[in-house]
Amino acid sequence: MIAQAKWWRRWTQSQTDVEAAELQDEMREEGVVPIRECNHGALVCVSGTVRVVTLRPKQLTPALEIELYDGSGYLTVIWLGRRRISGITTGARMTISGRLICSPDARVVYNPSYELLPMAI
């Protein structure tokens, strides 16, 4: 009965919802906290998929900015003084660790440590 309910829920969900649920399952297996459960000022360890990579214009301080999505939410990750980090591209999976800063508009982690994860098959 439970398997049938799970199948029906997946059948009636949008593709985006199905992908988000699968990503959340993968992140749970990594043993990290979902982004939506992270609080301002906390040291966080989250995993997800890079959805957007942004480079600041050359006139400003060099910075590499990404949007990391884990199925429950997203946060912005910024490395100051960097224009590029090998392996960090759209679609890459990674785990980051650092201090979370929250505002009404955004969740940001500056200069975190990170680990690139193998791509899902």
Image (cartoon, helix red, strand yellow):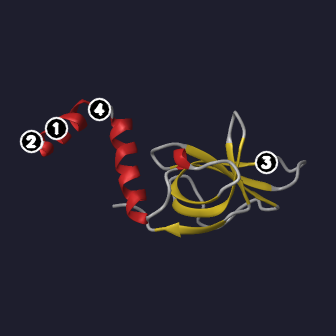
Judged by depth in the image, the label closer to the viewer, 1 or 3, is 1
In the rendering, at what x and y percent does residue 18 appear? 33, 40
In the rendering, at what x and y percent does residue 50 appear? 55, 52
Label 1: which residue?
5
Q: Earlier in the sequence, mark 2 or mark 3?
A: 2
SS state under label 1: helix
Q: CA distance from mark 1 to mark 3?
A: 47 Å
Q: Residues within 10 Å of mark 4 (few under 14, many from 20)?
A: few
Q: Earlier in the sequence, mark 3 or mark 4?
A: 4
Label 2: which residue?
1
Judged by depth in the image, the label closer to the viewer, 3 or 4, is 4
State yes or no: discs 1 and 2 in contact (Cβ < 8 Å). Answer: yes
Residue type, mark 2 in image: Met
In the rendering, at what x and y percent does residue 76 appear? 66, 48
Relative to 94, is 66 above or below? above
Q: Which mark is residue 56?
A: 3
Between 19 and 60, the residue placed more toward the observer is 19
Q: CA distance from mark 3 to mark 4?
A: 37 Å
SS state under label 4: loop
Residue displayed at 48% across by 50% down? 70
